[in-house]
Amino acid sequence: MDKRQQEILEQFDLFDDWMEKYQYIIDLGKKLEPLSDEEKSEENRLHGCQSQVWMVHERTPDGALHFRANSDAAIVSGLIALALAIYNDRHPQEILQLKPDFIEKLGLQSHLSMTRSNGLNAMIERIQSVARESLEPSPH
């Protein structure tokens, strides 16, 4: 398993019950980099999430992808923080090879509502889509 995902699993092992884990997820969301009002546009909105989610990205000088995202819902912001902890600042090929094992290993799918689970999957799909698009040659 990927080192970043392993670190997340170890963090969650520190908590005894899901109420503490939910609180930890919410606290992670509070640490997200804020997005400007301009970045919270329809173009950057993530569809497939029940709450409002916006995601932007940029290429770092070394070719990695840096994502920033935010939501109007506390728990969703925390799920964004988890996804970004795994995928952020990696090269596109690395992103595409990385399986989100942390979802199953944490038992997230059985502790999230269907809509939140779908939203988390939509976030990961958007990250992977951006990675795929960044590998395609640009049309001249």
Image: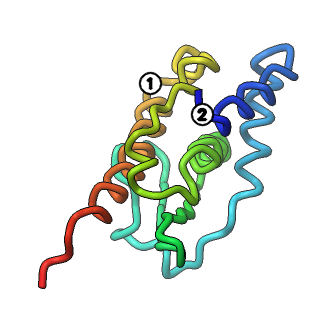
41 sits to left or right of 11: left
Please name the residue that numbered disc 1 is placed on: 114
Extreme residue toward the left, this view: 140
Identify the residue at horizontal 87%, vertical 22% (top origin): 14
Q: Nearer the viewer, residue 3 or 34?
A: 3
Identify the residue at horizontal 53%, vertical 72% (top origin): 62
SS assignment at label 2: loop
Give coordinates of residue 90: x percent, y percent: 53, 56
Identify the residue at horizontal 66%, vertical 44% (top origin): 78
Give coordinates of residue 104: x percent, y percent: 54, 18
3D distance between C-alphas at marks 1 and 2: 26 Å
Give coordinates of residue 73: x percent, y percent: 61, 48
Q: Is residue 17 above or below residue 88?
A: above
Mark 1 surroundings: few (<14), some (14-19) or many (≥20) residues within 10 A: few
Among numbered discs 1 and 2, the one appearing first in the sequence: 2
Q: Quadrant of residue 6?
A: top right
Give coordinates of residue 122: x percent, y percent: 39, 42
Q: Quadrant of residue 72?
A: bottom right
Identify the residue at horizontal 49%, vertical 55% (top origin): 53
- The quarter of the image holding the N terminus is top right
Q: Nearer the viewer, residue 8 or 117?
A: 8
Residue 80, disc: none
Residue 2, disc: 2
- The quarter of the image holding the C terminus is bottom left
SS assignment at label 1: helix
Q: Mark 1 or 2, which is nearer the eye?
A: 2
Q: Nearer the viewer, residue 37 or 92?
A: 92
Q: Amino acid at mark 1?
A: Met
